[in-house]
Image: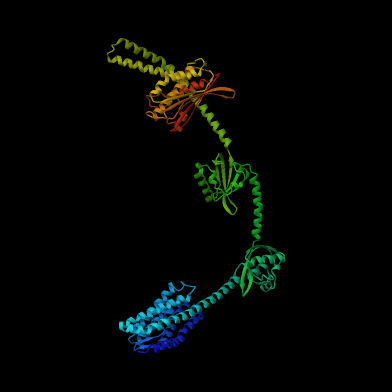
């Protein structure tokens, strides 16, 4: 075995001897970049073979520690190759050096092979995961890499056996860990710097080639201009075709010979382009045949051959300018037409207002168009129409067809609804697809239509009731005489037979039922107004109080509270008092039945309210009587039927369906009105209006 001083000296000498061979890696790198790009796939194999040859040369001049145990810089070679060249060259070089080391033989052949394998593995792992982790202190990153590789190399000595390994480590560890990592750092930094420099040069060449290709082969008009004096440095073939001058001629020209601006304005605009304060310009350029063309120029600074120039791309926009001018004229005509239209017109884009004429502003209750522009159209449609409107707009966009006239309900900005008639057509507005909507306020028309429908319904109801009344009167007269005959015969039978017999009970039942029929006939006669009674002035207080006295006991029995509110100084009313009393009695009875249906027993809302007041309309005095209950109300689908004869929601054994129809006839005979205000599930108000002076 060698002494420690001699051993350290020999290691240094061996490293120096190997350094020249390690530096050959830089030559391999340079050769890799010199070879044509088409050999790229072959280059990695070439690199692997050359590096393997360098490894063989290194291993021929090793430092011999003992018989069969040698050390050289193959660990540096293989690990740095993995770190800088990549997988394929590393695998090839590792296979060559492993084969040679095994061929060398000796006690350390498997240790040597292990060193090559572990160096390659650590180098590839470090290249993939750690090389770029510490970019600021790259030398430190690589130094840590070198330490890691050579600690692993020393660990491979245990392949020799523990006693031999410990003996070797005690003599070789310190110089290996001091010298080899530094060699790894120096060689790696040299190769990485080489790689970065060569890649930068390649990118520069590629960029210049791309620039020349783009500049000369592009169909866009391109100019290079010196911002200091405005001279044209270069022009591409597209520029020559556009302006009509040859490239040599254009290179001898100044931009002021093309641009119609003054020399001072051109210099000002070029300064903006150099400072990147502005990159888009609209100019007018001259051509060789003295035409002046509108152009759009995109300019910016560029470094070329060490000098700052302006790179300009020119677009012919003469057609676009002409189209834009025509569009402006067309839009002006459009605005004049739309603003002067008698209907509300607005345009929708993406579901929002993008235009509204003055009538649309008025229709929506806005002060100016800006209150509508940009807001969602759905905010101005009544919620009941949202689904319909969405479907209509979707169909208009899909099929580009007119939306037929529809009635709808708009909402003003203050929430007030407006009945409208709407028509829409697809339109392209402000570079977007949209919908132009024509809307007409039909609120007054709807009011007149509703009034007409109400009058027609009242007329039909009146005609129907008169027809039913005529029929009822005739039927009542026809039934009255036979019923009286049946009643009389039943009474004769009753007088002749014994009270304890079954026939006696039958006769009594016949009389009872004929009396019931007689009452119905009497009601029919009253409904048909066949029994005409004279009208005279009656005290409204007496009429109401007498009615209260008749029904108070029945109402109290059903746990119902009766509240009566009569205004002071109510005038006497010209009427048939008994008939008015009958109407009020019928309304109170209906209110009682409604409350009993909703509340079986006592309840705080089980109240009937009767109000009587006076008002004047069109110089005529009227008495208004309101009967209110908080029962189940009347559903909307039957409200139009409640005054029809024989219509009733009560069971057959509790009502004939004539009460309200008779009341309607009585009120009409008094030239009055009876109406209803109800909400299903909450309340019902019957409103009786009678003229004080019934003519």
Which of the 4 image quarters holds residue 608? Answer: top left
Quadrant (top left, top right, bottom left, bottom right) of the C terminus: top right
Q: Does residue 584 show up?
A: yes
Quadrant (top left, top right, bottom left, bottom right) of the N terminus: bottom left
Q: Residue at x 47, y 82 (%)?
A: 25
Q: Is residue 348 above or below residue 155?
A: above
Please tell me which residue lies in front, 270 or 454.
270
Query: Which x, y percent locates residue 325?
Result: 66, 55
**Colouring method of the image:** rainbow
Q: How many marks?
A: 0
Query: Which x, y percent locates residue 446?
Result: 56, 35
Q: Is residue 616 above or below residue 230?
A: above
Query: Which x, y percent locates residue 527?
Result: 46, 20
Please tell me which residue lies in front, 270 or 286.
270
Query: Which x, y percent locates residue 649?
Result: 41, 28
Q: Is residue 52 left or right of residue 403?
A: left
Q: Residue at x 33, y 81 (%)?
A: 158
Q: Is residue 55 left or right of residue 298?
A: left
Q: Is residue 306 left or right of residue 517?
A: right
């Amino acid at each position: 075995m060698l002494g420690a001083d001699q051993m350290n000296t020999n290691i240094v000498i061996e490293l120096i001897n190997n350094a020249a061979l390690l530096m050959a890696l830089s030559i391999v790198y340079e050769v890799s970049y010199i070879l044509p790009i088409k050999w790229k796939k072959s280059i990695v194999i070439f690199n692997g073979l050359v590096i393997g040859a360098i490894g063989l040369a290194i291993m021929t001049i090793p430092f011999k520690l003992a018989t069969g145990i040698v050390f050289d810089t193959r660990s540096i070679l293989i690990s740095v190759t993995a770190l800088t060249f990549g997988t394929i060259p590393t695998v090839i070089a590792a296979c060559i050096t492993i084969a040679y080391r095994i061929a060398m033989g000796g006690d350390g052949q498997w240790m040597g092979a292990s060193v090559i394998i572990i160096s390659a593995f650590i180098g590839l792992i470090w290249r993939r995961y750690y090389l770029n982790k510490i970019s600021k202190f790259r030398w430190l990153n690589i130094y840590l890499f070198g330490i890691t590789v050579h600690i692993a190399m020393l660990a491979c000595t245990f392949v020799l056996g523990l006693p031999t390994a410990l003996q070797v480590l005690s003599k070789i560890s310190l110089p290996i860990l001091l010298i080899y990592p530094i060699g790894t750092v120096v060689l790696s930094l040299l190769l990485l710097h080489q790689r970065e420099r060569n890649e930068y040069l390649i990118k520069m060449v590629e960029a210049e080639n791309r620039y020349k290709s783009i500049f000369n082969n592009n169909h866009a008009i391109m100019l290079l201009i010196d911002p200091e004096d405005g001279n044209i440095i270069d022009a591409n073939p597209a520029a020559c075709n556009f302006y009509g001058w040859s490239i040599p001629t254009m290179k001898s020209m100044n931009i002021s010979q093309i641009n119609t601006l003054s020399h001072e304005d051109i210099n000002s605009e070029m300064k903006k382009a150099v400072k990147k304060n502005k990159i888009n310009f609209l100019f007018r350029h001259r051509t060789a045949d003295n035409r002046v063309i509108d152009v759009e120029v995109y300019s910016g600074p560029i470094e070329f051959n060490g000098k700052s120039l302006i790179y300009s791309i020119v677009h012919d926009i003469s057609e676009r300018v002409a189209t834009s001018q025509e569009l402006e004229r067309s839009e002006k005509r459009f605005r004049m037409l739309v603003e002067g239209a008698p209907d509300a017109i607005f345009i929708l884009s993406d579901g929002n207002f993008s235009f509204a004429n003055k009538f649309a502003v008025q229709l929506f209750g806005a002060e100016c168009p800006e209150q509508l522009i940009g807001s969602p159209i759905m905010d101005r449609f009544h919620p009941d129409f949202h689904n319909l409107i969405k479907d209509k707009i979707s169909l208009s966009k899909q099929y580009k067809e007119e939306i037929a006239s529809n009635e709808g309900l708009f909402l003003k900005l203050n929430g007030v609804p407006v009945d409208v008639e709407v028509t829409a057509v697809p339109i392209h507005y402000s570079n977007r697809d949209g919908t132009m909507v024509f809307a007409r306020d039909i609120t007054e028309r709807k009011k007149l239509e509703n009034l007409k429908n109400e009058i027609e319904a009242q007329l039909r109801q009146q005609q129907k009731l008169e027809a039913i009344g005529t029929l009822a009167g005739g039927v009542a007269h026809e039934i009255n005489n036979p019923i009286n005959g049946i009643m009389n015969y039943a009474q004769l039978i009753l007088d002749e037979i014994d009270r304890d017999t079954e026939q006696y009970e039958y006769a009594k039942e016949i009389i009872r039922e004929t009396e019931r029929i007689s009452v119905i006939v009497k009601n029919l006669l009253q409904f048909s107004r066949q029994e005409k009674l004279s009208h005279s002035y009656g005290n409204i207080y007496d009429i109401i109080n007498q009615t209260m006295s008749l029904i108070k006991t029945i109402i109290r029995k059903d746990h119902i509270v009766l509240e009566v509110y009569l205004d002071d100084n109510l005038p006497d009313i010209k009427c048939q008092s008994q008939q008015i009393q009958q109407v009020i009695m019928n309304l109170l009875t209906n209110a009682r039945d409604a409350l009993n249906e909703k509340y079986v027993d006592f309840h705080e809302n089980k109240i009937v309210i009767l109000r009587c007041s006076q008002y004047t309309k069109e110089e005529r005095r009227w008495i208004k009587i309101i009967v209110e209950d908080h029962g189940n109300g009347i559903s909307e689908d039957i409200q139009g039927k409640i005054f029809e004869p024989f219509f009733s929601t009560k069971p057959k054994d509790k009502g004939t369906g004539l009460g309200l129809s008779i009341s309607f006839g009585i009120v009409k005979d008094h030239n009055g009105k009876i109406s209803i205000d109800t909400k299903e599930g909450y309340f019902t108000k019957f409103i009786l209006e009678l003229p004080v002076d019934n003519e």
